[in-house]
Amino acid sequence: EVQLLESGGGLVQPGGSLRLSCAASGFTFNTYAMTWVRQAPGKGLEWVSGISGGYGSTNYADSVKGRFTISRDNFKNMVYLQMNSLRADDTAVYFCAKYRAVVNYGLDVWGQGTTVTVSS
Amino acid sequence: DIQLTQSPSFLSASVGDRVTITCRASQGISNYLAWYQQKPGKAPKLLIYTASTLQSGVPSRFSGSGSGTEFTLTISSLQPEDFATYYCQQLDNYPITFGQGTRLEIK
C-alpha cells in the first residue's frame, strides 16, 4: 500500500525552528517528486515547497523562501522540511504529498498531516 | 505568480443535483490543472488531473474540462458523500498555486 506518514509537528515559539519528516512506503520513492502543502486553521491549501526525484532540485513559495529547506533521503525513503525563523502565520497543518509520475499531473498520495503551532 | 479564482466560493445543492464549479487562471496554464476534494479533518484527495483526466478510483459522475485560463469541475448527480470542499490547483508554473476553495453543502 502506498503510504505517507508525517511527524515532527508541535508547538514552537516565534523565531524557533522545527523539522518535519515524512516517511514514504509502497512505491519507488527515488523516482517521484515530493512536496509539502499546508493549511492554516479554517483556511485553504497553500503549496509550500517541492523537491524532484533523483538529484532533488527544489522550489519554494515566496512566503517561506530563505526560511524553510526541503530535502530528501532516497535511502531512507524520507522527505524533510526544515523550518527556521518560524512566525505565527506559519501555524498550519502540514501535509506531505507525492506527485504523479509527471509533476504537472497533480498530487495523488497525501499523508494525514502534522500540526505546527507557532505561539509564545 | 498565477492566481486561481474559483466560483462560487459556496454552493448549496441537493442530492441528485448537477453542479459545476469554475476555476479561472490569471494567465494561461495549458491543461495543467488538477481538482481535489477535501473533507473536514482529512487530507485532500485528487479527483481530476490535466484538466479532464479522472484519477483512478474516482466515480465517473465527476468530470473536468477546460484549457488555457478557464476550467470547470462538474458533478453530474450529487451523492451524500460529495458534500465537501473542492480546490483547483495549477501545476504549470512555480510557485504552484491553489484556488481559494468551493464549499459544497447540502441544501
Image (tube, coloured by chain):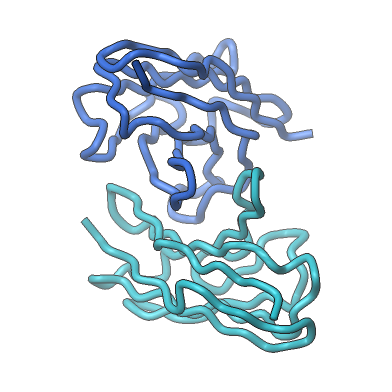
Tell me the quarter of the image containing the N terminus of chain B. Answer: bottom left
Which residue reaches farthest front?
A120
Q: How many marks?
A: 0
Residue B89 image offset from top left, x and y in percent: 43, 59
Tell me the quarter of the image containing the C terminus of chain B. Answer: bottom right
Q: Image check: B26 left or right of B57?
A: left
User: Residue at coordinates 59% horizontally, 65% vertically from top-left?
Assistant: B48
**Chain coloured cyan in the rendered structure:** B
Q: Image check: A73 left or right of B53?
A: left
User: Residue at coordinates 44% horizontally, 50% vertically from top-left?
Assistant: A43
Look at the picture and state if B13 lies above or below A24: below
Q: In the figure, residue A38 lies in which quadrant? A: top left
Q: In the figure, residue B49 lies in which quadrant? A: bottom right
Colour assignment, chain A = blue
User: Residue at coordinates 70% horizontally, 31% vertically from top-left?
Assistant: A3
Q: In the figure, residue A12 lies in which quadrant? A: top left
User: Residue at coordinates 74% horizontally, 64% vertically from top-left?
Assistant: B58
Look at the picture and state if A83 lies above or below B67: above
Foreground pick, A19 / A51:
A19
Look at the picture and state if B32 lies above or below A37: below
Residue A23 image offset from top left, x and y in percent: 62, 20
